[in-house]
Every structure is written in C-alpha cells, then in structure tokens.
Image: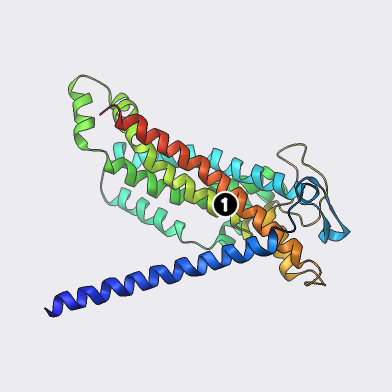
C-alpha cells in the first residue's frame, strides 16, 4: 500500500516537473512570437543592416547562419556515423573502446566556449583559415560530433544481432551486412542525433564568436573563407552590447523569431527524412 502511494506521488511529481518545463518553454516561445511577429516583413528578411545593426534587415545574418549549420552537418554527420559504425561493429570491445566512449561522452558535455577556443587555435590560427565560414563550420562540427556519435551508436545497437548474423551466414562480407541489413534500419535513430546537432549548432554563440561571426557586415560572403554575420551573435550583441537596448528591442525579438523558424525548418527536414526511413523499412518487414 505504501509502495503504491509512493509510486503515485513520484509519478505526479514527474508530471508536475514535465508540465512546468513545458509551460515555461511555451511561454518563452509565445513571448518571442508576440513581440517579434510585428517586426517580420519582406524588408526585414531580405534587407541589409544599417545604422550599426539597429535598423534595416538581417539577410546577411540569415545566410551566414544557414551556411554555418549546413557546413557543420555536412562534416559532422558522416564522421559521426562512421565513428559509430567502427565503435559498434569493428572495434574490439575492451578497455580501449570503453575509454574512447567515455571520452566522447565527456566531450558532449564540454562548454561551447572551449570548442570556440580550440577552433580559434586550430582552424583560425594554425591552419590560417582566419575568421571564416570554414573555420566556424568545422568548430561547430566538432562541437556536435560527440552527440551524433552517441545517438548513432545507440541506433546501431538497437538493430537485432540476427540481422548481421543472417547476412554473414549467406556469405556476405561484414561491410555488406552492415550496409544492407544494419545501417538502413539504424538511419531513423541516427537522424535523431542530426536533429539534436542542428539545434545546438544553430543556437550557439561562443564558438562562432571566436571563429567567424561579425556583428556588422552588410555584405554576402563570396567563398567559405569569408567572414559572415550570424543570427545568434547578432542577437547577443543587440541584447547586451548596444548602447540603446530599448531602441533595438523590436530587432531583438524579430531576430530571435527568425532564428527559431530556421531551427524549426532544419529540424522538420530531418524529422521528415527520419519518418520516411522508418516507413520504408517497416514496409520491408
């Protein structure tokens, strides 16, 4: 009787925590939409900034953000999936592999400013890329790589062992078994890592602050070696560094709303791909 009562109280406590977090997030999103929707216009989305960023549009920042997130995913997703395949399918399970896994999990919790300093030292200074799209994208890719590896490993482990053994019993090589009987069924779970990575890459300020971002640069990049504006850094400067915060308050909300929409679009694309993979391979069962 006491155990049932304790379990009920625990369940209600967890519900309360969940509902409270959801309510807070919903309020934040509602506040951004309420205050930012009036700022959104074609001129705001397609125009270039003026008056030190306090007026005009945010088109260069939109282009810069999309370029950085796309570059980070292009680099991190193949590397993350390849690393997960090696650790799960090829690596000899033992202390070394467990140490590597521990290091990956630890890196997933490292503050983003540390990745920013690393990117500054390696890509900006050592490789002499300067403050550029390629330096920022590679830094963001390294930051989200641990998350993609961890989620991809979990997706691979969820595929039944019999799928591998059946292919090997028919004479397939290990890579053929992985490519045809394991990887397709793990892809939906791997896309979860991509979704998490997109959200983090799009919203981080510290890594791009040190490797690519400029606050006022009313031009579009010509190559991956150019510096760009980015929505997270633009929003950060407007909210903390501008001499007249109240004057740029509408610009802050409008920028935040556009950033939310961009993250949502990227995530929806990944979710749609994941859903299609799930439907495709369920139909083969």
Q: Quadrant of the N terminus?
A: bottom left
Residue farthest toward the top in the current orientation of the protein: 171
Residue 243 appears in which quarter of the rendering? bottom right
Q: Which residue is mark 1?
A: 201
Residue farthest toward the right in the current orientation of the protein: 51
Q: Is residue 124 left or right of residue 80?
A: right
Query: Which color mode does the image show?
Result: rainbow
145 above or below 243? above
Residue 140, image x and y in percent? 58, 50
Q: Looking at the image, can residue 258 be seen?
A: yes
Residue 44, image x and y in percent? 78, 51
Total residue callouts: 1
- The residue drawn where x is 70% and y is 51% is 212
- The residue drawn where x is 22% and y is 38% is 160
Q: Is residue 170 left or right of residue 37?
A: left
121 above or below 240? above
Q: Within 10 angstroms of label 1, few (less than 14), some, or many (20 or more) residues?
A: many
Q: Is residue 158 left or right of residue 213?
A: left
Residue 11, image x and y in percent? 27, 71
Residue 38, image x and y in percent? 73, 59
Residue 285 appears in which quarter of the rendering? top left
Residue nearest the observer in this picture, 249 or 125:
249
Q: Looking at the image, can residue 127 be seen?
A: no
- The residue drawn where x is 53% and y is 48% is 198
Residue farthest toward the left in the current orientation of the protein: 1
- The residue drawn where x is 27% and y is 43% is 158
187 above or below 1? above
């Amino acid at each position: 009787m006491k155990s049932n009562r304790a379990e009920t109280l625990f369940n209600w406590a967890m519900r309360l925590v969940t509902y409270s977090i959801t309510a807070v997030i919903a309020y934040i999103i509602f506040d951004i939409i309420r205050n930012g929707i009036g700022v959104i216009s074609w001129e705001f989305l397609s125009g270039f900034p003026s008056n030190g960023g306090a007026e005009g549009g945010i088109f260069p920042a939109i282009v810069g953000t999309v370029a950085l997130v796309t570059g980070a995913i292009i680099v991190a997703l193949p590397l993350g999936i390849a690393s997960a395949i090696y650790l799960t399918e090829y690596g000899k399970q033992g202390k070394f592999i467990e140490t590597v896994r521990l290091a990956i999990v630890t890196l997933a919790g490292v503050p983003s400013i540390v990745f920013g300093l690393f990117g500054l030292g390696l890509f900006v200074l050592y490789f002499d890329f300067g403050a550029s799209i390629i330096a920022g994208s590679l830094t963001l890719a390294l930051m989200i790589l641990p998350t993609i590896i961890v989620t991809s490993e979990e997706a691979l482990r969820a595929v039944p062992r019999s799928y591998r053994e059946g292919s090997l019993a028919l004479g397939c090589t290990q890579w053929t078994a992985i490519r045809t009987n394991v990887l397709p069924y793990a892809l939906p779970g791997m896309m979860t890592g991509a979704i998490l990575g997109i959200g983090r890459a799009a919203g981080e300020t510290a890594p791009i602050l040190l490797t690519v971002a400029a606050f006022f640069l009313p031009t579009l990049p010509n190559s991956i070696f150019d510096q760009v504006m980015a929505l997270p850094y633009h929003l950060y400067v407007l909210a903390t560094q501008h001499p007249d915060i109240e004057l740029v308050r509408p610009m802050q909300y409008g920028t935040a709303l556009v950033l939310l929409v961009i993250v949502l679009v990227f995530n929806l694309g990944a979710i749609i791909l994941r859903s299609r993979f799930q439907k495709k391979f369920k139909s083969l069962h």
